Image: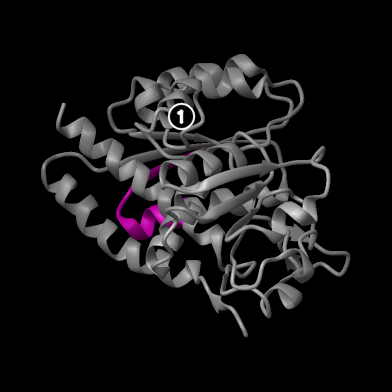
Amino acid sequence: MTAQLLDGVALGQKLRAGFKQRADELAAQGMRPGLAVILIGEDAASQVYVRNKVNACTQAGIHSEKYVYPCDVAPQVVFDKIAELNADAKIHGILVQLPLPKHFDADSVLEAIAPQKDVDGFRAENVGALMQGQPCFIPCTPYGAMKLFEAAGVSLKGKEAVVVGRSNIVGKPMAMLLMHAGATVTVCHSQTSDLKAHCRRADILVAAIGKPKMITGDMIKPGAVVIDVGINRTADGKLCGDVDFESAKDVASFITPVPGGVGPMTITMLLANTLESAERSLNT
């Protein structure tokens, strides 16, 4: 058996095809959707992510603004910019690219973003709403994974799901979404004993641990659906996920490639959240 690929590039393009029309319809009513992105420091990966997000906005008809600060910028400068953007009617979403320099308190920065513009869904208020099953904005990476399940016709009701990783950005919200969809969810992490045993019973396996090729084919239940959130760079400079793709593809029924799986869907769902924010603003 060779797994079918869950192609995030193709699905992202399909979804984005409708975004431009939605953005243009809003613009015709006097409201062009707007996203502001704040980048602090010179992290190469973050620079690539921000560039990709800005380019995606342009293609979708979404106005974008980018604010770049040196890594030693005073936190108050960034807080002042966030306050300015919160009050700017042209901006419907604010994204602060993570990770931040060590002299920043990331939680305080995220909490400074107005809830109605928190298109990453990272504020405590939005996290709580997700927990209750009534999210204002769904965090983009788990949101993208759910869209991949939906597009492939993967039923989650009654399935055993294992999420490897417990980050606030991916692991925890992913677990909540799977649970709300009817799956029985186990969250594994660095202190989990016998990780292989947990993974082997998973009908749905989501790897978001940040360690290259940690999940190997012998850890996967035959026929499982595997979502690889990880993006790592090997010693020879190649990109790889948290799953050893070559051994996993002969065991799983569906699997996301890296690159080209979850990554493009993360940006796609950021655009979706920004559009939704603008539409809400128009209707209030």
Q: Looking at the rendering, in which quadrant would you find the N terminus?
A: bottom right
Q: Secondary structure at mark 1?
A: helix
Looking at the picture, the colour scheme in use is one colour
Is 69 located above or below residue 200 in the figure? above
Residue 140 in sight here: no
Q: Please, what is the three-letter code of the amino acid marked with disc 1?
A: Met
Is 162 located above or below residue 227 in the figure? above
- Magenta span contains residue 110: no
Span of residues in magenta: 54-66
Dividing the picture into quadrants, the one containing residue 70 is: top right
Residue 190 in sight here: yes
Indicate the position of residue 213 as horizontal and vertical percent values. Answer: 79, 63
At a point 76% along the width and 61% down the height, the residue shown is 215
- Which residue is outermost to the right? 235
- Which residue is outermost to the left? 29
Indicate the position of residue 48 as horizontal and vertical percent values. Answer: 62, 54
At a point 64% along the width and 24% down the height, the residue shown is 106
Q: Nearer the viewer, residue 113 or 131?
A: 131
Q: Which residue is mark 1?
A: 131
